[in-house]
């Protein structure tokens, strides 16, 4: 097993895992359940980590992660729906509440 990514944001690590799994790479998520007990273990060991099972997938996994990290427009900041004024997470292109499309100027 090889660790390919880690981030304090479990949602981001989970998203990367989904992308790798979708590409046929077997992954393992470490520390995904430790966020609530940070006081009991060394902080550095509580960082959610994404590992790949097969070492042969390393090149492919690294490339996918690099693409994810270098495309911030796809994982932008949260935006406000122009129709219903709900705050929507940046990973979504449509409002979770009314399904309105994200405006082009989102993220400013
Ligand atoms: Zn909306």
Image (cartoon, grey):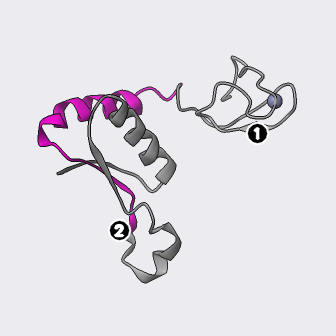
- Disc 1/disc 2 C-alpha distance (Å): 31 Å
Q: Residues within 10 Å of mark 1 (few under 14, many from 20)?
A: some
- What residue does disc 1 label? 87
Going by the picture, which residue comes out furthest to the top? 104
Position of residue 65 relative to residue 48, above or below, is above
Which residue has dot 2 on it? 44
Q: Residue at x 45, y 26 (%)?
A: 71
Image spot of residue 37 (x, y percent) = 49, 76
Disc 2 is placed on an element classified as helix
Could you tell me which residue is drawn at 49 percent across and 67 percent down? Answer: 35
Q: Is residue 13 magenta?
A: no
Question: Sequence order check: which comes first, mark 1 or mark 2?
Answer: 2
Horizontal side of residue 96 vs 25, given as left or right? right
Q: Which residues are magenta?
A: 44-73
Q: Secondary structure at mark 1?
A: strand
Does the segment drawn in magenta span residue 68? yes
Q: Position of residue 102 (x, y in %)?
A: 71, 22
């Amino acid at each position: 097993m090889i660790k390919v990514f880690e981030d304090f944001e479990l949602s981001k690590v989970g998203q990367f895992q989904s992308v790798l799994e979708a590409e046929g790479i077997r992954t393992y998520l470490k520390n995904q359940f430790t966020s609530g007990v940070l006081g009991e273990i060394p902080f550095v060991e509580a960082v959610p980590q994404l590992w790949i099972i097969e070492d042969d997938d390393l090149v492919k996994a690294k490339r996918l992660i690099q693409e994810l990290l270098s495309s911030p427009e796809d994982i932008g900041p949260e935006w406000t729906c122009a129709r219903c004024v709900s705050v929507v997470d940046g990973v979504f292109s449509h409002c979770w509440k009314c399904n309105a499309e994200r405006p082009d100027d989102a993220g400013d």
